[in-house]
Amino acid sequence: MQKRWPLHPKPHSYETLEQYVRRLAECYGARYEHFCLRALGIPADDSQARRFQEPTPELLRRLSDGTGIPVGLLEQMTLLRIWNRLMDEMRQYAETPEGQAELKDFSNRLLSQNS
């Protein structure tokens, strides 16, 4: 197990893993690719891995060890999972009376602009 990094801010709501790791790199004044290589072991030529769309368990463990963020939370930070969570929250809101009223108001505004 590696030692926790001295700088390890908490992720923001709806922040993807890629955005979070880019912010970590900025904290250290490092280029993103260099930070990914040195801190996470992602080869410089592996741009796919640096997108964090399907991070490996080992990669998540290294990031968790360095930041103290639980692996389970990091797993929820892929773009797909954040998008799904956001869509689910929007659906839930749209089912409330407030959400339905806002959708109706929005629809009415669109219709009046197109008239």
Image: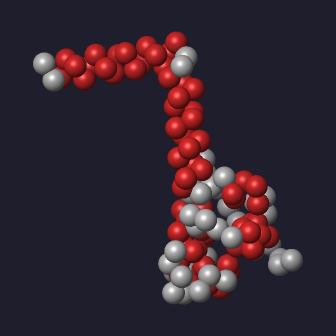
Q: Position of residue 17 (x, y in %)?
A: 60, 62
Residue in view at x 18 percent, y 23 percent = 113
Q: Quadrant of residue 46?
A: bottom right
Q: Can the viewer see residue 19 in this picture?
A: yes
Residue in view at x 50 percent, y 78 percent = 47
Taking depth in this image into account, of 90 and 14 the one nearest to the observer is 90
Q: Position of residue 114 (x, y in %)?
A: 16, 23
Considering the image in quadrants, where does the N terminus appear? bottom right
Q: In the rendered view, would you say 3 is above or below 43?
A: above
Q: Position of residue 54 (x, y in %)?
A: 61, 65
Residue in view at x 31 percent, y 20 percent = 107
Q: Residue furthest left?
A: 115
Taking depth in this image into account, of 2 and 9 the one nearest to the observer is 2
Q: Quadrant of residue 52?
A: bottom right
Chosen colour scheme: secondary structure
Q: Position of residue 89 (x, y in %)?
A: 57, 33
Q: Is residue 20 left or right of residue 62?
A: left
Residue in view at x 76 percent, y 60 percent = 71
Q: Can the viewer see residue 63 in this picture?
A: no
Q: Is residue 53 left or right of residue 75?
A: left
Q: In the rendered view, would you say 42 is above or below 74?
A: below
Marks counted in the figure total 0
Considering the image in quadrants, where does the C terminus appear? top left
